[in-house]
Image (cartoon, rainbow, N blue to C red):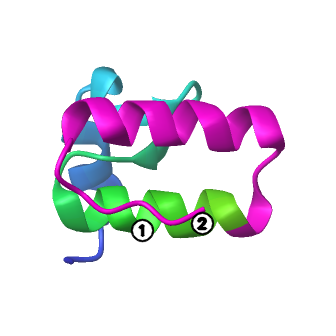
Amino acid sequence: MAKLNTADRGKIPTGEFALPGRRYPVEDEAHARNALSRVAQDGTPAEKAIVRRKVRRLFPGLKQEN
């Protein structure tokens, strides 16, 4: 997974973020995995559910834990 700099992050469409406020980019499978990991550490139960739904919709074959 390539690290996103500010310019590259700004180019990602808003719809490719899991949460409002352009939080947790999920534009590819690597970022989706990272979003799941980060929200598991720091997210509220509601945020976790939203991120999981978004990742499941975009990447149905991606194995999700918890």
Which sits in the foreground, 50 or 66? 66
Left or right relative to 25: residue 43 = right
Q: Are the two marked residues, 1 and 2, in contact with CB atoms closer than 8 angstroms?
A: yes
Q: Magenta span: helix, strand or loop, mainly? A: helix
Residue shown at the point (28%, 29%) measured from the top left = 57
Q: Quadrant of residue 42?
A: bottom right
Q: Give amino acid for label 2.
A: Arg
Label placed on residue 26? none
Circle count = 2
Residue 55 in the image, given as x and y percentages of width and height = 35, 42
> What is the span of residues highlighted in magenta in the rendered image?
41-66
Left or right relative to 27: residue 42 = right
Pointer 1: residues within 10 angstroms few (<14), some, or many (20+)? some
Question: What quarter of the picture does the N terminus occupy?
Answer: bottom left
Left or right relative to 16: residue 52 = right
Q: Label 1, label 2: how many angstroms apart (C-alpha)? A: 6 Å
Q: Quadrant of residue 63?
A: bottom left
Secondary structure of the residue carrying tag 1 is helix
Residue 65 on the magenta segment: yes
Which sits in the foreground, 14 or 55? 55
Residue 26 in the image, given as x and y percentages of width and height = 31, 47
Say above or below: 13 vs 26: above
Q: Mark 2 points at which residue?
A: 38
Residue shown at the point (64%, 57%) measured from the top left = 39
Q: Mark 1 points at which residue?
A: 34
